[in-house]
Amino acid sequence: MVLFSSYTIIDGIFVAKGVSDLALAAVNISLPFINILSGVAILLAMGTSTLCAFSMGKGDHERAEKIFTQTVAVIVVLSAAITLAVCLGAKPLAYLLGAGPLTIGYASQYLHVVCLFSVCFILSYCLEVMVKVDGRPQLAVIGVGISFVVHIGLDYVFIFLMGMEVLGSALATGLAQLASMIFFLSYFLSGRSNLHFRRFRLHLGDLRTILPLGVADCSIEFMLGFLTLLYNHVILSALGEESLPIYAVIAYISLLVSMVMQGIAQGMMPLVSLAVGHRDRDSARRFLRQCLLSVLVVGVAVELVCQLAPGALVSLLLEGDNVLFGGAVSALRQYALSYLLAGVSIALAGYFAALGKGGASMLLSLGRGFVLLPAALLVINLVSGGQGIWMAALVGELLSFLLGLVLLRSTEKKPLPAGQTA
């Protein structure tokens, strides 16, 4: 997760330093489309990996391969439809995502190029998940590492050496995913894998099983895209298009913080589930406490950096003499107050999921991303006339934190799912 978020941030740095702050804002405006592609990938990959693992565990290898092949075929068809739709409507989509007269050119160009690689984004992630099911998790790290190196290298070549500006960033992003996809495909086509492609007949029942299994995880990607879209529109209307780069800076820094928090939570989850399986709830609670302590340490460390040296972070994306630099420093200091509370909510949602309390996990995750944070932003924007929007994240995360505490208290009082005891 850190690797993925790091090369996304480095991509932003190349755009900011090699093109302009408005180009950085345009790329950030386009990121919800990337979130949609990632969400679709997660939606299909999570359920497919589960069904394939079940079938392989039962010794039905043929069924696992048919499910795997069917998902790959569905991805190819769906990606072609997405590519065609965005190619025909890149400019309207850019306006929908929050672009204005100053950023529409960059944003529509970025979307037009990136959409050509839709199949690479979706399929590379699905294959990355499936190599783990195939018993080769180390290949997933190698595949992401290849994408990292290709992305950063091509960013430098296309933007700084060839002067391709936003077009270069989009090409580097797409070609990095293409490299990752080729790496994973070569493994499954090499004969070294346990899973192979085979003839299949479309089985809609498998798809109906696959899709619900990926809803909870893919909703996080859709949530990130939705919040980015909402912030861009609020800033566009309240502060003007020239202020969009300020949110771009915050969005890139927040991505890294969020990925670290999610990584901590996901590291806790299998430990909690194992403890529950052993009927050891005390250990499950201990793992939660350790997770919350880790989140606290990370949150405090990030908060100190953001409060004591925010200029150092902002300078990664904006030059010190930029007219927006001071505003970005002030905005980051305010927005960063939400990071610790966000980490706690992410940890609690993971804890609920690990306990088998999917309803509580989804209520906290979806309530946080689609209700509480957006509501806080819209209300504070209305009340303050746009001047207090950087504090909206703190208010929304505080409400999410309180919801998490209520759900935690309720969850601890209830018995565990059937077949498990406290």
Image (tube, rainbow, N blue to C red):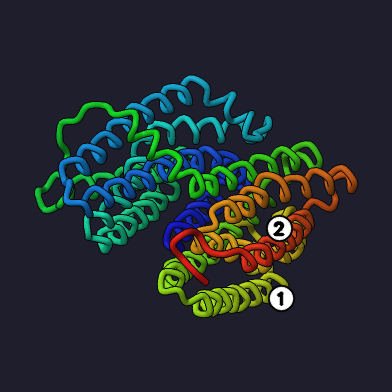
At 61% from the left edge and 53% from the top edge, which residue is drawn?
365
Q: Which mark is residue 308?
A: 1
- Residue at horizontal 48%, vertical 26%? 86
Circle 1: residue type: Leu
Q: Where is residue 75 in the image (x, y as percent from the top left)?
A: 34, 34
* Quarter of the figure with residue 174: top left
Rendered image: mark on residue 400 = 2
* CB under 8 Å between discs 2 and 1: no
Q: Nearer the viewer, residue 176 or 159?
A: 176
Where residue 105 appears, as percent x and y from the top left, is 58, 31
Q: Is residue 285 left or right of residue 206?
A: right
Asked whether the viewer can see residue 34, the reply is: yes
Give me the C-alpha separation between circle 2 and circle 1.
Answer: 26 Å
With respect to residue 295, does 121 lie above or below? above
Q: Identify the amino acid type marked 2.
A: Ser
In front of the other: 128 or 420: 420
383 sits left or right of 27 in the view: right
